[in-house]
Amino acid sequence: MSNDIHSDLHAALSERTRHLQAVAQALKTELFGIDDIIDRVIDSLRAWYVLPQLIGRPVIVCLWGLTGTGKTQLVRRLAQHLGFYDRFIEVQMDGFSHGSGYGSRGSISAMLAESGIDEGTPGILVLDEFQRFRTLDGNGHDAKVERYQDVWALLSDGRLPPALSMLGEIESSLAQAEYEQDRDGPADKKKAKKRKLHLAPWEAQEVKRCLKLPDTLLQIMAWKPAEVHARLRAFRDSQQSWETDYSKLLVFVSGNLDEMYAETARRVEDCDTDADIFHALTRKLSLIDVKKALAERFKPEQIARLGNNHVIYPSFSRATYVQLILSISDRYVEDIHQTSGVRFVLELSVYEQIYANAVFPAQGTRPLFSSIHAILSATLVNAALWALEQGAGGGEPVRLSLETAADKSCIVARYRKAHRRFTVSLELNQLKKRSNEDFRALLAVHEAGHGVAYGLLFGRAPQEIKINVASFEGGYNSYEQRKAWSRQNLRDRICVSLAGRAAEQLVFGPQACTSGASQDFRQATAYAAQYVRHFAFGTRLSRTDVANDAEDNLNTDLEATNPEIEALLAQEHARALALLEAHTPAFMAVVDALVHEGSVAPAQLAEMLDLPGDAGDSTDAYAALLATFKARRVDGPAPAEPDAGPGAATRAARLLRAMA
């Protein structure tokens, strides 16, 4: 018999494991660009799904990411594929959950009681928009939170106590009603005795939930006050377990932690920065970044209850956006084919212009969906009507391309020898065009100055150089972040910041320099002040700053550092000018490329400046410097020891050898 049980268990576990693998594959075909996240989520819930009898407390999986990256969609589709959609509840933690009644809006336990999740059985709970449920305000003080206070008990062990305060309020309300009836006249007392319902629906719901009663709401509402009092008294006096057991829940905590994505989340208008740059930046985020961001919103003990299973969504890469564009566009084409019989083939220019006019890397899929609908939906309908007039509808396709001009853009439909143009609105294309020849020349010179100086000083090309920009009036360079700044590369960074103005001076002359470098000088001054005042790279070692508190032990002599900061800026501006003069041919090649193309790719700039193709990590060679120092000072001949005993270097060498 035991062998049969073992065999049945093995078969059940194998079947559930296979099904989980199938679910993972299905999710990967539906959701683009998050395969690693899907794998991690599946691994996190494997024991909960395959062996639920082992689960003694809720399994908590936290999903953090920018808006529109598919967090909620992943959980919903997962619940459907696992067959849990009838045991699935989604709570908006801002307090406005869809379908919540009057009595359930402030309580997670009440919403669970109204759901299809039975006590002590597996179910899926989603706590969405969790970042809005902050318990600390912006100053770190307690924030007033009235809703969902039982969530912390649920996250702790899945066992929720009854709302005794609510039951007390109901009991008090009934007592007050009886008191008022006792004061009324005989006619009112007779009328009160004829009442069929004595509890409001929400009161009956609370009694039913807390006392775990099988009675219907109408039955409970019909109880007389004396019976309600007796039931509540018996409940309080009984030795039964008051707790409601939701320990077998799979809980997804989901939200947008803008503090963690500070470099990207607030750049909602940025449609110019390459999606791969944001993707690389957000892929570096870790569990530590999550904890720091949560600490600005929640108390330490609350953060602990969220656990350590924090899954971080990077922003979408360029390849993911391309996949999405192809998938969504093909769906539109297939729908038109099914309804009209016309088969369209979209040429590369259509996809390219959709990407250029629909992708906002910090905002995920939502702007993409709306832009594709605006560009394709009406155009495909109109093009289908035209194509049917031309006799299309059989096997021969109608080809669509997209042409852009100075004043408008058109999708061109071609069928055999006939063609037709359909105007489409591509607003970003118009914003990115710099038709003024003088302004374009100014931007090209300024941005080329920054890009060339950065390439020569840091040995790598900037991530991007662009002057065709829709987000603001101007151009920009994007640089890799550094993990640490040395004295030399911080000076180099100041030099790069000043190279835009130096390029203007070199090409246009001192009198024609523009105000476009104002932000550059602001940034360079900040770097120079840190160089002198904070990092001790100048002539002083003390931390020099403004004291805000009597306990701030700082050197507050700011005025004495101002001349050194100004001298540093003057030196680096002169260095930038000399650098560009020494590399004028390469500098002008970059200017020409920007004037004609509007941007310069990293590989293109690397070739112009003869830079290595792969510059490696953006840190200095500190490991090699350490090895050199050790070889010279530790592993080499020991210095002569004075009579007083071994010197510091010798003692250090002995200690290192002992520790090796």
Image: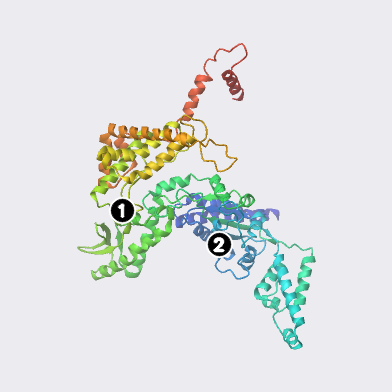
Identify the amino acid type marked 2: Asp
Depth check, front residue: 400 or 110: 110
The picture quadrant where one finds residue 650 is top right
The quadrant where residue 13 appears: bottom right
Residue sitting at x 36%, y 53%? 471
Quadrant of the rendering where the C terminus is positioned: top right
Please give the residue where the numbered disc 1 appears in the rendered image: 432
Q: Would you place residue 180 above or below residue 556 in this image?
A: below
Q: Are marks 1 and 2 in contact (CB under 8 Å)?
A: no
Give the side of residue 332 with respect to residue 640, left or right.
left
Q: Where is residue 425 in the image (x, y as percent from the top left)?
A: 30, 62
Residue pictured at 59% horizontal, 51% vertical: 140
Q: Is mark 1 on a helix, strand or loop?
A: helix
Question: Where is mark 2, residue-wise?
Answer: 94
Residue 146 x, y percent position in the rendering: 62, 62
Q: Is residue 481 above or below residue 420?
A: above
Residue ranking furthest to the left? 417
Vertical placement of residue 190 versus 209, above or below = below
